[in-house]
Image (tube, rainbow, N blue to C red):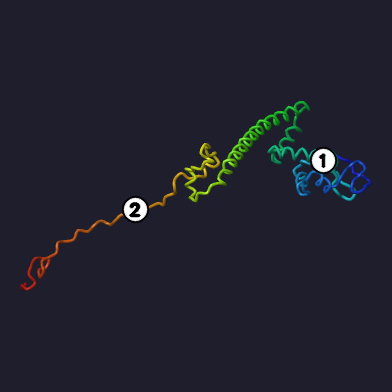
Amino acid sequence: MSASTPSRRTSGSSASGQMKIGELARKTGKSVRALRHYEELGLLGSARSEGGFRLYGADELARVYWISKLQDMGFSLTQVQGLIATVESSGTAPEAMQSLREMFRSRLLKTREQVERLLQLERDLAESLAYLEGCRVCTSEHDLEGCASCDSPVHSDTRAPSLVAGVRLTTAPTARTSTVTAPPSVTASPAAPLGVAPSGRDPRQSP
């Protein structure tokens, strides 16, 4: 991925098709900061002009597109580093392509699983939206709990989709009540007769 330093530049590019980092950013849709980060991670190389500018050619352009594709597939930049290291550490070209083939086969299976989940989500959303369109004609004024037993003719023969049924409450939420325990009752002593002290003696009697 090396490139010779051009001795002459024309309209920001050399005759060999090299470009500055700003032009590479525009062509790939990446930010200049991202491209510099790729270089810091060893994912991207560059040549230098006589003025010290970074220069990129067709190989670097292809590498940036390749990194973008891997990121679209769910690869992190760290995983891209590992992928490159695995390929470069292979003893032979067939061995390197075998490693690449196994990685891509595994990613293909995961991608197909993701696609199937997204297709199911698409069906659920379409079904739910079709059901909710029927709610536009609802003229009843009721709480949300009333939707659990909707008797609208629009929904009479339609079961609520899972994305709708999970929202509708079947019972109204009840407030928690706390039980207050009364203190133990105190048994009062029987009242003494009028004029009689609790000891049973007549207070008029002398001790």
Above or below, comparing residue 5 to residue 93 in the picture? below
Q: Residue at x 86, y 41 (%)?
A: 57
Check the image and report above or below for 91 versus 40: above
Locate residue 24, reporting x and y percent.
82, 45
> Quick check: 177 left or right of 38?
left
In-front residue for pair 184/136 = 136
At horizontal 76% and vertical 44% (from top left) the residue drawn is: 38
Give the amino acid at mark 1.
Answer: Leu
Q: Quadrant of the C terminus?
A: bottom left
Q: Nearer the viewer, residue 121 or 14?
A: 121
Give percent across and percent down for residue 19: 86, 45
Count residues near mark 1 (Cα–Cα under 10 Å), then give few for <14, some for 14-19, many for 20+: some
Q: Mark 1 and mark 2 in contact? Answer it, CB < 8 Å.
A: no
Give the labeled residue for mark 1: 61
Say the numbered circle drawn on residue 25. Answer: none
Residue located farthest toward the top when viewing the structure as drawn? 94
Taking depth in this image into account, of 158 and 178 the one nearest to the observer is 158
* Secondary element at image label 2: loop
Q: Estimate the spatial distance between the alpha carbons at disc 1 and disc 2, rounded to whole Å.
A: 73 Å
75 relative position to 148: left or right: right
Question: Callout 2, which amino acid?
Answer: Thr
At horizontal 14% and vertical 64% (from top left) the residue drawn is 191
- Could you tell me which quadrant the N terminus lies in? top right
The location of residue 91, given as percent across then percent down, is 76, 28
Q: Is residue 141 above or below residue 119?
A: below
Element on which disc 1 rests: helix
Q: Position of residue 174 (x, y in %)?
A: 42, 50
Residue 179: assigned label:
2
